[in-house]
Amino acid sequence: MERKVRTAVIGCGMISKIYIKNLKNLFSIIDLVAVADLNRAAAEGKAAAYGVERVMTIDEVAADRDIELVINLTPAFVHYDIIRRMLEAGKHVWTEKTLTVTVEQGRELVALADEKGLYLGVAPDTVLGAGTQTARRALDTDMIGEVTSGVAVINRNQSLNAEVFTFLRGNGGSLPFDVGVYYIGTLISLLGPVECLHAFGAPARRHEPEFLFRNAEAEPWTIPGSNLVSASLKFVSGALVSVHFDGNTIGAEQHNITLFGTRGILKVGDPDKFNSPVSLIYAGQPECTLPFTHGYDGQNTVEATPFDFYGHRGVGVAEMAYAIRQGRPNRCSKEYGLHCLEILAGMEQSVLSGETVKIESRFDMKPLAPGYYSGFGSGRGDAEMSLVH
């Protein structure tokens, strides 16, 4: 077994529950030793709930020489400051999506990590889950031939969500950045990098509070940036994919990623989940669901908690921890995160300029080894072996 990586979490909000729970119970490579939050009571609550030994300040995390890896679960608009500080302190960093809120800041952090020889990993890590990895396996084994085109669609009432999750009212809270990133991350993990794009869009509408009592004294707000984007992406492979992210509609979400190939059609489902079904269509044949070829299907959480569809969040952290020990590239790399960010920012740039935007960054993501599953014993199963290779 590899030596465990001593790890701390910064940011003890909603998403931290599933991260902390999984890091404590599902990944033998991680030694989660501390949590930190500007709201110390929030950090103390998480430490008590999940048996984390230390509650620290952010300053203490940066200064602790024994902590090798920091997991940043703060809102996107403070990512740059936290990540830069931890890299400068000599820590490897994993961050929730997006890398930052501007491409310029993202490039600066990538350069800093390179300069210091440190790992920087970026969500979404749902691309390492059973659903997306099964879809990748189908493509890599030529089940639908050459992918010629595709479509990706998600809708949500993002302004209404921002009443509960108030961080969505800031930069990075629009639907493309908050949710569309899962669709972009999945598309590029399957099809490789994007060469250029063209987009149309619309801003979020001014929102009057709707939840009775909860926001009785709240002032109306507008989420920054384009909350509705319709774009065409040209991939380096030649595939043309249409994406449609609408945060100005109702909350009855319609999830769709469909890839059209020269010999078949592949439906990928909801990329925000680890276990979204993958189905195959051939001419003249009924649609069939493919069995998962990989583990991390999101179903083996240690105890039931709200938002359990978050599933195996943290698998990207564990995969990066193995990469650190083995001296190899991690899959949800800084280059992957920067490419996601550049595509999202490129959409906004195209909306404002009316011009086609060239995407400069590139990345490579090796698939996980197939044939390892999550359904044995404690729920860890042998899926962790897929992260070792």
Image: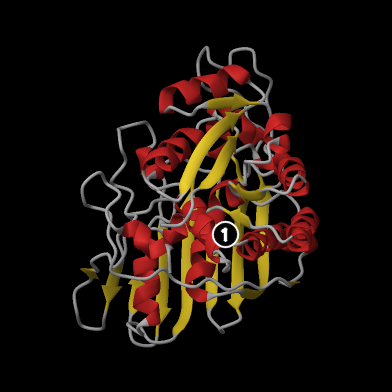
Identify the residue shown where x is 56% and y is 24%.
Answer: 43
Q: Judge left or right: residue 148 versus residue 234.
A: left
Name the residue at 58% across, 24% down. 55
Percent across and percent down for residue 332 are 55, 61
Question: Which coloring applies here?
Answer: secondary structure
Task: Please give left or right for residue 179 compared with residue 376 in the image.
Answer: right
Viewport quadrant of the N terminus? bottom left
On the image, which quarter does residue 103 sit in?
Answer: bottom right
Dividing the image into 4 quarters, which one contains the C terminus? bottom left
Q: Position of residue 244 (x, y in %)?
A: 54, 59
Report the number of discs: 1
Between residue 303 and residue 280, name the one nearer to us. Answer: 303
- At x 71%, y 71%, the residue is 359
Other residues around mark 1 within 10 Å, as few (<14) / some (14–19) / many (≥20): some
**Amino acid carrying mark 1 in the image:** Ile
Residue 8 visible at all: yes
Residue 160 location, quadrant: top right
Residue for badge 1: 324
Q: Nearer the viewer, residue 97 or 219?
A: 97
Give left or right: position of 325 versus 1.
Answer: right
Q: Residue at x 50, y 68 (%)?
A: 189
Q: Label 1, secondary structure: give it.
A: helix
